[in-house]
Image (cartoon, rainbow, N blue to C red):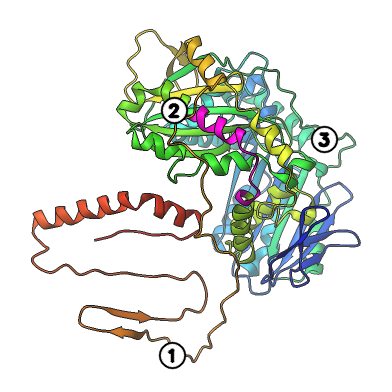
Amino acid sequence: MGWKRNRQHGEFLPKKKRKIRSLGREELIICPPSSKKKYKAVQLKNGLRALLVSDPDVTVAAVSMSIRVGYFLDPPEAQGLCHLLGSSAYPGKNDFLDYLTLHGGNSNAETLIDYSRFYMHVDPDFLKGALKRFSEMFISPLLELESIEKEILGVDSEFETRNTVDRNRHEQLKSHTSGNGQPYQRFGSGNKKSLCNVTIVDLQKLMKKFFDQHYHGSAMKLCILGGESLSELESWIKKYFCGVKESSEPITTVFNLPKPIWDASTLYISEGVEGRNVLMLSWMIPPLTETCYLEKPELYPLILLDKASKGSVYAILGDKGWVTGLDVRFEGHSSYRSGDRLFSLFLSLTALGLEKKYEVIRYTYQYISLLRKIEPQKWVFDQYWKNRRTKFNCLEIDACTFVENLSVNMLKYPMKHVLSGDYVHQKWNPKSIKDIMKVFAPENMRIDLIHKSFKASDFETEPWYDIRFIEEQIPQKFIDEWRNISEIDSSMHFPPKNWFMQTASKPRDCISEDEDKIPKILVDKSFLKVWHQREQAGSAHAYFCIYVNGDSHTVENQLMMHLFARLQRDELNDLLWEGNEANLSNSFTL
């Protein structure tokens, strides 16, 4: 069931029992060993690429279309246009939505920097009718004026909701403060003000022009999950999507972003709306490439910076009382070969940490310096990817998420890896890791601080989200310290192996329907009782119940028990974090 090692090439290859499904004469797709689904890739004459998934046991049919066009391509005079088009009217829209509602379905869409995604789900018995109506959006949208006006109000309502979330506001501030001429300087979500910058008739013309330029088959990736046979699903695709326009021009979605995008010597301080102080450090990393996607070197620093074990940057800053949370992720720019990406570190600061913000950054660079000095450790990837492969082997995703992920992965990976690409590591390359570590430098960094008590009197205002912010010049001495780390804190060290990580996986034997499912008592004593019950499938669970003698229902005792539980959890924090990293969840309740 596992993976064997190819010593010559350093690749993980599937054993015979791993399912590799044929998609045609030359294409294969790697599937979870327990998967009963059947797959087939189809490409229409217009260039549209579709992945058909047949599952006779499906309880919800789902469809997702990803198109290689996003708000980076919005015209300056109508920012948010790509988003508006993604939620706009098309022939029979009301008929489509009514049909879905009548048959237990729903639909939605989203627009990102360089791709848009449309998805729906419906009762499996009514997939054919829903698919026919769904396809019309990508063939001949009417874009009627009345419908456009209605959708503008919907976009504006969504904008108002987004304006209550610091992460959305921060993303827009980064766009606003990028250099002139940058494609990143966009207002991608749009609102009534940005879309009504031109007359409704001119907006309609812009939308039709945008559709004609970008909505063509070679830009589209479609995934369908249904209970029908692959041949029947294929016939539907050819019938309903053959009318999608064909493009004779090659797709170009690589944005050559002029450098630098932001001023690396500036600290951007903005007001928050969620009552938190958050320090954000972002570095630009290279775009996804054919080689990069197989090696994924950027995950090495992410895994290590995200650790909370003793000696990690988070543990040290937490012990000092400077931070209460840390998150590491890729964000901002997309990872689908359209341009550079952002590697971002988010630190939730205490009041003391706010005062020590530049010290927090210095400790972060100390830890990065430590990682650079140590040769890339293969066991870090081995543990991480073994955990990911276990998730892949037991992959259980709801129908909607399943097709949504696959349609996007068709933009991201070759067909062979559309299902396994996020879970399986193909090559170990220490050099690529060393190269990626070089990007973590002050001259390639953007620093943001969301301040819950923003009190500056002389400030600028971001025009769309009305964000008040200031640009503070970072003292050069701090930048020099970060660039030339001369000493690393003695309490900081490379993390040890996580012994909670499983070393092998074997699916549990299924229990028969008539097997006794009543819990069996294994230990029966006055001070201790242990029960065991077998489950048909899913994760294993262990419950420990401790009964407190005496009058525990007084206010004082209840408070003491809550304090004890919090202190106990804090004491076990390192241990619990390692368990969480190995997918062992836990909770303390009273």
How many angstroms separate mark 3 from mark 2 (CA)? 38 Å
* Vertical position of residue 29 compared to residue 156: above or below: below
Quarter of the rendering occupied by the N terminus? bottom right
Q: Which of the numbered marks, if any, corresponds to residue 251?
A: 3
The mark lying in front, picked from 1 and 3, is 1
Q: Is residue 508 at all visible to an observer of this figure? A: yes
| SS state under label 1 | loop
Going 25% across and 78% down the picture, which residue do you hit? 528
In the visual, does 219 lie left or right of 144? right
Q: Give the x, y percent position of residue 86.
A: 64, 39
Q: Nearer the viewer, residue 581 or 449?
A: 581
Does 374 appear in magenta?
yes
Q: Give the x, y percent position of residue 185.
A: 61, 21
Pointer 1 residue: 516
| SS state under label 2 | strand
Q: Which of the numbered marks, if any, corresponds to residue 53?
A: none
How many angstroms separate mark 2 from mark 1 (CA)? 54 Å
Q: Residue furthest top?
A: 458
In the visual, does 83 lie left or right of 583? right
- Sequence-wise, which precedes: disc 3 or disc 2? 3
- Sequence-wise, which precedes: disc 1 or disc 3? 3
Going 56% across and 59% down the picture, which residue do you hit? 105
